[in-house]
Amino acid sequence: MNRASQIIRTSVIGIIANVMLAAFKAIVGVLASSVAIVMDAVNNLSDALSSVITIVGTKLSQRPADLKHPFGYGRVEYFSAIIIAVIVLSAGVTSLIESVKKIIAPTEPSYTTVTLTVIIVAIVVKLVLGIYVKRKGEQLKSDALTASGADALFDSIITLATLVSAAVMLLWNVSLDGILGVLISIVIIKAGFEMLSSPINELLGARVSQELLTGLKKDVMAFDGVRGVYDVILHNYGPDVLIGSLHISVDDTLTAYEIHGLTRAISERMYELHGIVLTIGVYAVSTGSHRRTELQDMVIKTLSDRKDILQLHGFYYFEQDNRLSIDVVPDISVTDESAFAAMLTDELQRLIPGVQISIVIDHNYSV
């Protein structure tokens, strides 16, 4: 079963669980002639909304690419997660308002055997459902499913607080509804903002995980002829779609045909291993007894000694213009890139007078 099918199946289980719980509450409410329990049953039907949103979002995200959206609709999943997170936030704010009202104007709740039974059943169902759905969401890397599971867990926590409040009320005749409600509401609101952060960060272009980056570089370096991997840029178009580019450095003795074969083999292998659609650029490393090799070694040795430089690559010597160019990735401590490039240019100019120096300030977008 593929990822989308598992997400939909898990969401369907969530809908079924909420419908069954609602049916149970409705039957008990009718038999006990309790309007409150019947209304709570209706509320449980609305709890299935997050699962419905997850299913709709997953279905939409599976739409094939078209002219308007050439990378597909995978990011729809992030919008689903945002909607569910907003629902959780709204529930938290509503709960906070109601809890504050209870503190200001406390009311004496009444509990019966029937209502306590309903509360206990609701806690068990929501707790089991929340743990299951949240775990599946984390396993499938679905923000919407994770948020839906968290929504169910918070429902169980709120209901558990009601049970605790009922126990305290029955034993000591003290109502804790308002105080417990405020504390739990704050936790829910905080969690709602945390739920929002993940999908929003993905939409804004969050960095890929260090684990993925390390694995990708290691797999590319495993190819014969690759001497270095640089400029890794990956764009997330949904949990299943990564598109990007990177550069490899190879000896300048390789022919264009050999480089063509190497880059194609790397692209195919990275798609098999990581599901990444890659465009691969090439930097030529000068070898042999040439003026450009001498300049390359001199420049790299000089700049490598600096602690404010993280990486050097892309050296090229334009013989006709007597000009060399090199890409420099500075440390985060470097704030004025223009001044830094000018300083490096002056340093190299003193070392190799007569040669025009071009320092390209580069950035590492994936660490």
Image (cartoon, helix red, strand yellow):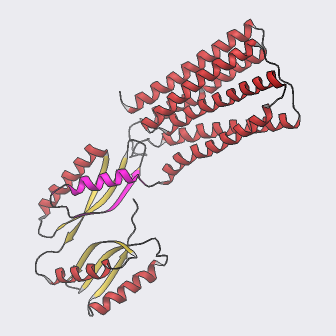
The residue segment tinted magenta is 207-235
Residue 275, compared with residue 162, is above or below; it is below
Task: Give the position of the C terminus as an image quadrant.
Answer: bottom left
At 69% from the left and 16% from the top, the residue drawn is: 118
At 45% from the left and 83% from the top, the residue drawn is: 339
At 30% from the left and 59% from the top, the residue drawn is: 246
Q: Is residue 247 something one can see in this rendering?
A: yes
Q: Front-most of 70 and 93?
A: 93
| Number of numbered tags placed on the structure image | 0
Left or right of residue 317: residue 96: right
Q: Front-most of 216 and 278?
A: 216
Give the image location of residue 36, x and y in percent.
77, 18
The quadrant in which residue 124 appears is top right
Residue 245, compared with residue 140, is above or below; it is below
Q: Is residue 88 magenta?
A: no
Give the image location of residue 286, x and y in percent.
17, 74
Task: Give the position of the N terminus as an image quadrant.
Answer: top left
Q: Front-most of 23 and 83?
A: 23
Which residue occupies the extreme right position in the image?
105
The quadrant in which residue 2 appears is top left
Q: Front-most of 241 and 28?
A: 28
Give the image location of residue 321, x and y in percent.
24, 86
At 55% from the left and 32% from the top, the residue drawn is: 149
Q: Is residue 41 something one can see in this rendering?
A: no
Give the image location of residue 295, x and y in percent.
21, 83
Which residue occupies the extreme top position in the image?
31
Residue 290, compared with residue 8, is above or below; it is below
Left or right of residue 234: residue 111: right
Residue 93, compared with residue 266, is above or below; it is above
Left or right of residue 32: residue 238: left
Left or right of residue 260: residue 197: right
